Image (spheres, rainbow, N blue to C red):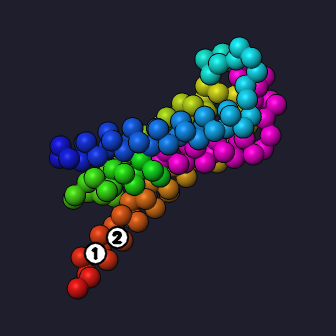
Amino acid sequence: MIRNVTAVVVGLIVGMAANMALVHLNVTLFPMPEGVTFEDTKGMATYMATLPLQAFLLIIVAHLGQAFVGGWVAARISTDQPMAVALIVGGLSLVGGVVNMMMMPLPWWMWMEIPLYLVVAWIAGNLVLQCRTKKASAP
């Protein structure tokens, strides 16, 4: 059980790092105006209104990347519950995504990403299970 809790915590940390790396890339490609920070709600709304579609697609990749990378790492660390820990990471990422959507002035169509958090976490856990199955059946 301790290993599974550790898997979830490490998965969340690694997933958040992947998310932040892609967010940083997005801000590098599409710089914020001088003086605007993520905490500046009004400035962020103005900034978001100027972003092209590619910036929002990169944001979706960052968010779903958190669930996938975090879920994959958690599944790899877990010895007995890889799918469960991957889905827990995906679920916690989903909660963070909903909170983020409610706080940031993002376009309405970005809500389509919400159910995908669990899908990509499931894919990550499934990839780990498939690799383990292949290893176990190898001569």
Task: In the rendered structure, find residue 97 and report the number of the disc placed on it.
Answer: none
Q: Which mark is residue 135?
A: 1
- In which image quadrant can residue 60 be found? top right
Residue drawn at (67%, 32%) of the image: 27
Q: Position of residue 104 (x, y in %)?
A: 65, 27
Query: For numbered disc 1, what is the local secondary structure?
Result: helix
Q: Give the range drawn in magenta.
A: 42-67
Q: Which residue is drawn at 80% across and 29% down?
A: 49
Specify the farthest residue to the front.
28
| Prevailing SS of the magenta stretch | helix
Q: Is residue 49 magenta?
A: yes
At a point 71% along the width and 14% down the height, the residue shown is 35
Can residue 84 be seen in the rendering of this structure?
Answer: no
- Give percent across and percent down for residue 75: 33, 55
Q: In which quadrant is the C terminus drawn?
A: bottom left
**Which of the numbered marks, if any, corresponds to residue 131?**
2
Residue furthest to the bottom: 139
72 falls in the magenta region: no
- Residues tagged 1 and 2 counted as in contact (Cβ below 8 A): yes
